[in-house]
Image (cartoon, rainbow, N blue to C red):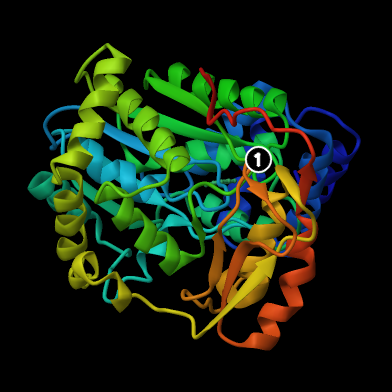
Amino acid sequence: MNIKDIIKKKRDQKELTDDEIKYFVSEYSNGNIPDYQISSLLMAIYLNGMSEDEIFTLTMEMANSGEILDLSSIEGPIVDKHSTGGIGDKVTLVVLPLVASCGVNIAKMSGRGLGYTQGTIDKLESINGFRTNLFFQDFISNIKDIGIAIMSQSEDIAVADKKLYALRDVTSTVESIPLIASSIMSKKIAAGADKFLLEVTCGSGAFMASEERAKLLGEIMVNIGEKLGKETVAIITNMDQPLGRYCGNALEVKEAIEILKGKGEDDVVSVCTWIGAYMLKLAGKGENIANNIKMIQNQIKNGEGLKKFKQLIALQGGDVNVIDYPELLDTAPVRLEVPATHSGFVSAINAKVIGEAVVRLGGGRLKKDDEIDNSVGIEVCKKIGDEVKSGDTILIIHSSDEQKARLVIESLQEAYNYSDEQVDKYREIIDII
Ligand code: URA
């Protein structure tokens, strides 16, 4: 068996055998196949897809390419949550402390920014001192202590995904159903939880642009979970505009704290409460979603979610003062307002352009080992349905210097469409699988 033949087979739209998938995953993980050949295979998979059987095998091989965490010493069900990525998607930061504050064990392994989306690990690392590279023993003991731990993918967990994820990011092979499904599910399996909640984003700022593709991705991941006897729910959420008000690492942490203090914008609060409600259901805390939503809302009102977030920051070495003084987070020195080019109702926003602007400002990676600037980002002042007059501020760019901000202003203006007619209400939750 050799990698050249495997690339050729996938290029020619043929189905790979279990042995071929096993071969390329293990040889790549062990450093025996170079990035340029795997890049070519990734592009062939991106273009020609994979069958559900191939995706399942790929997922299992990726999960088994490293350690599988054993969380059996923790009492009660353990729930994990993962998003397929979006713009301004700080749901994980908000919802995990809220659900943990209801007495549910949360074991979360997260990733860094991918493509034009920001990642939970980069966001958390914008809190001074916050450690995301936990030892496995600490991961477990933190969950036992406070019911929640969030760690980055260590070198020895889902090794193949760690390498493939970084390579996909720089080879334009991210938006692929087999590659996303196997990446997410291999990490979830390796991290050892019993139940999974998947937030599958859909729209202009998501890797899945259409509802149809988002639902297919959700179904494939749910099928993988069910096949392994792990109860899995996928919630398809709308990412046709950035979620909430801010996009950018430190800005999103600041916003997450605001949401936990009860001051969040409606769209992001709604997504968090729905996802939280389904996580409670998965954990056996209540079958009735309307009641579970109330429970989550209550944990915002009574401050228990915020308290849990503070405990999480403290236990992972972060500066808890950011809760009371969010201005301690990195702040960009320049703010540049972006004026609307038309009058009317905002009818569409190309959220991907906003994500790309954050990357160009330095808030994401263009190359695998780029350093990122956590302080930069975009503040979204006008959303779909809002009425604006030409010249009104639609966005505010937070940048390290004015020149960088000026370079993205035109594309940001072009990301907005306007209509003379009033625009229909925006649906945050599209489907539940
Ligand atoms: N999140 C992941 O972990 N992997 C992907 O491929 C996309 C989003």
Secondary structure of residue under mark 1: loop
Displayed quadrant of residue 312: bottom left
Q: Residue at x 42, y 56 (%)?
A: 120
Q: Residue furthest left?
A: 145
Q: Residue furthest right?
A: 12
Horizontal arrangement in the rendering, residue 347 relative to residue 226 (left or right)? right
- Residue 98 location in percent, x, y? 24, 40
Q: Is residue 342 visible?
A: yes
- Residue 43 location in percent, x, y? 80, 48
Q: Amino acid at mark 1?
A: Asp
Q: Quadrant of the N terminus?
A: top right
Q: Is residue 369 visible?
A: no
Q: Residue at x 68, y 35 (%)?
A: 177
The residue identified by callout 1 is 240
Q: Residue at x 47, y 74 (%)?
A: 374
Displayed quadrant of residue 15: top right
**Location of residue 16 with respect to 373 vertically, above or below:** above
Could you classify mark 1 by the number of other residues whose Cα lies within 10 Å: few (under 14), some (14-19), or many (20 or more)? many
